[in-house]
Image: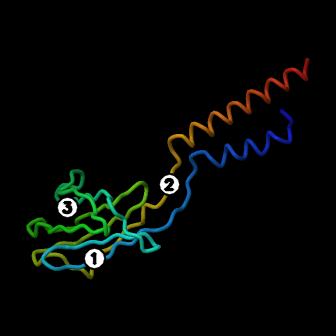
Amino acid sequence: MKAKFVAPLMMLGLLATGGRALAHGVQTDYLLSNQLQLQSTFSNGQPLKGAKVSVYAPNNPSQPWTQGVTDAQGRFAFEPDRALVGDWEVTILQQGHGDILTVPVDAAGVNPELISSGEGTDIHYASGPAIWLSSTLLVFVGVVTGLRRQRRAR
């Protein structure tokens, strides 16, 4: 294998490995009626349909109080227990995209003016076939390059 082909192949392998890449953002809008109604969409307006939603009460932040999935329009609704006063956390996740909301609840219920969104979770890591293919390619190029250098050294 000629040296001029090795560098492009190595670059291709590095580009295909599991580095972080920023993706399009997710926005969650909400409406308060008898329930807190959430609607999550990508920055291009497409609904975040089928996303896993986990709601955590302030008295047990490690165990979901309720769970579900968003509908075809990216919507999910729930009514927090007013007896569990404090900050509730809502995570909405779909294949590396998502949003995290903090929902303050007091004896009067949810105050929509105090709902806040955490940092989006729109960072992706390559996985599956891309990692295996790029790893195999890098190992192959390394072995071939090493063998060629050994032959030249003799």
Q: Amino acid at mark 1?
A: Tyr
Q: Quadrant of residue 33?
A: bottom left
Left or right of 118 on screen, residue 80: left
| Residue type, label 2 | His
Q: Position of residue 47 (x, y in %)?
A: 37, 69
Q: Which residue is mark 2?
A: 124
Vertically, is 35 above or below 53? below
Quadrant hosting residue 21: bottom right
Q: Nearer the viewer, residue 61 or 10?
A: 10
Give coordinates of residue 45: x percent, y percent: 42, 74
Q: Quadrant of the N terminus?
A: top right
Q: Amino acid at mark 3?
A: Pro
Separation of marks 2 and 1 at Cα, in angstroms: 26 Å
Instruction: Say which residue label 3 marks.
Output: 58
Q: Which residue reaches farthest front?
A: 72
Q: Residues within 10 Å of mark 3 (few under 14, many from 20)?
A: some
The one nearer the camera, 101 or 37, is 37
Residue extending furthest toward the top? 154
Which mark is first along the chain, 1 or 3?
1
